[in-house]
């Protein structure tokens, strides 16, 4: 599905397990590789916020989110009250597995955009992200593909990408230089392109978009976007919504 493609592209270090338990559907988020303690909490908060936002956009407004549960497998943070801005159900901490628990009956609920035409359109939009960034240099495209399939909260550095491509770091830097770019420029280019698309193609909040792109503070996202577009994310979204 489109949702699976999005999840796999952004959260390469996680897998999803769906399980029916009684009248509930338990969605478990399981790491597929070691993640630092600080990075893990940030990653799970990002997955939770973006996942709930996506479901709310696609499911009917009449559903009772108060019947849902969020189980976090880490200690309660000092800002835990902010979680309720995104989730109306019960929230607990120090669980064994990170889980989002929903009424199983929701699985048969028709989606707001549930038809083959919308599916084809979404698939085309996903493919166009790479297409719009594609260059004449295969090395640049390979680096972009690696970054797009990585978790933006723990992006690989130049040496890790070089190892993934089975070339030396020196060779990778040389090839990128020949193509007139750098790792940092490619990373910022992808972040900027995704930021614009999230702003004018989704209802995600500015904070959700910032977290999904790996910014630990929304202010940093504002500064980066302002520097690239000469306008704030809010103004950019308003301009496109008025068209």
Image: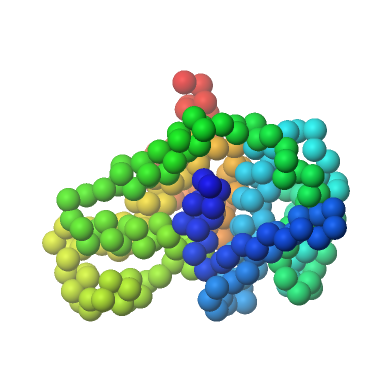
Corner quadrant of residue 114: top right
Residue 110 visible within the image: yes
Q: Is residue 159 above or below residue 138?
A: below
Furthest toward the top, the residue is 243
Residue at image position (54%, 52%) is: 4
Furthest toward the left, the residue is 178
Corner quadrant of residue 139: bottom left
Comparing 146 with 226, the one in front is 146
Q: How is the image coloured?
A: rainbow
User: Percent x, y for residue 51?
Assistant: 64, 51
User: Percent x, y for residue 196?
Assistant: 44, 40
Comparing 6 with 185, the one in front is 6
Q: Is residue 128 above or below residue 137?
A: above
Residue at image position (55%, 73%) is: 32
Residue at image position (17%, 51%) is: 136
Residue at image position (26%, 76%) is: 166
User: Percent x, y for residue 113?
Assistant: 60, 32
Residue 196 visible within the image: no
User: Percent x, y for residue 134?
Assistant: 26, 48
Q: Is residue 234 above or below residue 85?
A: above
- 9 sits to left or right of 27: left
Picture mark count: 0
């Amino acid at each position: 599905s489109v949702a699976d493609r999005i999840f796999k592209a952004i959260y390469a270090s996680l897998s999803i397990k769906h399980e029916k338990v009684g009248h509930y559907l338990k969605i478990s988020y399981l790491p597929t590789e070691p993640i630092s303690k600080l990075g893990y909490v940030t990653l799970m908060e990002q997955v939770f916020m973006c996942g709930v936002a996506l479901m709310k956009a696609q499911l009917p407004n009449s559903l009772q989110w108060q019947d849902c549960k969020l189980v976090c497998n880490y200690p309660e943070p000092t800002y835990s009250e902010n979680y309720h801005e995104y989730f109306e159900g019960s929230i607990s901490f120090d669980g064994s597995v990170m889980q989002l628990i929903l009424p199983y009956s929701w699985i048969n609920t028709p989606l707001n955009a549930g038809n083959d035409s919308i599916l084809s359109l979404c698939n085309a939009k996903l493919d166009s992200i790479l297409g719009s960034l594609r260059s004449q240099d295969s090395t640049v495209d390979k680096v972009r593909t690696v970054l797009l399939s990585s978790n933006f909260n723990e992006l690989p550095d130049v040496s890790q990408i070089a190892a993934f491509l089975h070339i030396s770091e020196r060779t990778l830097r040389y090839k990128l230089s020949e193509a007139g770019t750098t790792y940092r420029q490619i990373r910022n280019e992808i972040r900027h392109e995704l930021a614009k698309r999230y702003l004018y193609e989704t209802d995600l909040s500015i904070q959700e978009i910032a977290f999904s792109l790996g910014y630990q503070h929304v202010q940093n996202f504002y500064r980066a976007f302002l520097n690239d577009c000469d306008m704030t994310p809010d103004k950019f979204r308003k301009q496109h919504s008025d068209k």
